Image (tube, rainbow, N blue to C red):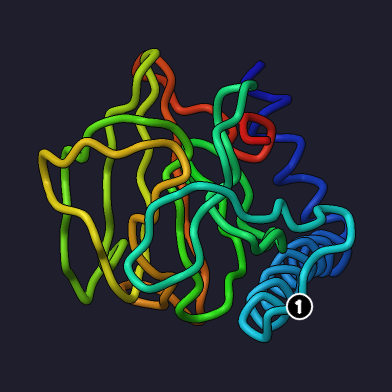
Amino acid sequence: AYVNKYIEPAMNFFYDPAGIIFGVIEAYAYAWAEWFLAVLLGGLGIEDPERPNIGVGQGAGIGVPPGPGPSVSGLIWPSNARRISGYRFTPPSHNGLDIGTPLGSPIWAIRAGTVTHVAHSSAGFGNRVEIAHTGGYWSRYAHLSQISVWKGKTIGQGQTLGLAGSTGNSSGPHLHIEIRYNGQYINPETSMK
């Protein structure tokens, strides 16, 4: 097992160093290009045709359009923006999903619950909200420009939590969302409708 894991890749490097190096560069370049395109298009308000807008319903707001109505399937999409960046759910390095969103667009709660943490920061996740939801779910919404809820507030599904931004460790407007189910991170992209 040691030979297959460490020795063979090292030997392959000596046989074809350019192939190994260019393969790594190509993989990272593709991911960065996809992420940049998602942030650029999301920031301009251009939607992904594969993920049409979900419309608006009876959510609560702070002078912004209301969120989507309740979902019978469980978790709803947190924004009208549907452009997924190159940073998808790849634990343990990236436990969430980055959605390219126009600056200032409303961000909605994916499920009813109680706000457990609110932070205003210029580092890391930036301005963020964390919620303990019904049914064993937990979620984090990061890089917000404004936050409209507070710790201890009970919120409904589709209620506006704040506005999309680019605070913290961010290179453009987007929403970073993480979801846990019974304490384990789950893939937001496949969990939300």
Residue 49: image x %, image y %? 88, 62
In the image shown, does 36 or 75 lie closer to the viewer? Answer: 75
Image coordinates for residue 163, horizontal then vertical, percent: 39, 70
* Residue 24, picture quadrant: bottom right
Seen at 57% across and 41% down, the residue is 69
Count of numbered marks: 1
Q: Position of residue 128 (x, y in %)?
A: 28, 58
Q: Nearer the viewer, residue 177 or 7?
A: 177
Looking at this rendering, what residue extends furthest in the front direction?
58
* Quadrant (top left/top right/bottom left/bottom right) for the N terminus: top right
* Residue farthest to the left, as pictured: 152
Q: Which residue is mark 1?
A: 46
Placement of 120 over or under 41, stated as above or below: above
Give me the residue at 68% from left, 35% from top: 193
Left or right of residue 59: residue 49: right
| As drawn, 114 above or below 40 | above
Instruction: Name the quadrant containing residue 45.
Output: bottom right
Label 1 neighbour load within 10 Å: few <14, some 14-19, many 20+: some
For label 1, the SS is loop
Task: Examine the rendered structure and indicate whether residue 18 appears above or below residue 71.
Answer: below
Q: Residue at x 62, y 22 (%)?
A: 72
**Left or right of residue 186: residue 51:** right
Q: Amino acid at mark 1?
A: Ile
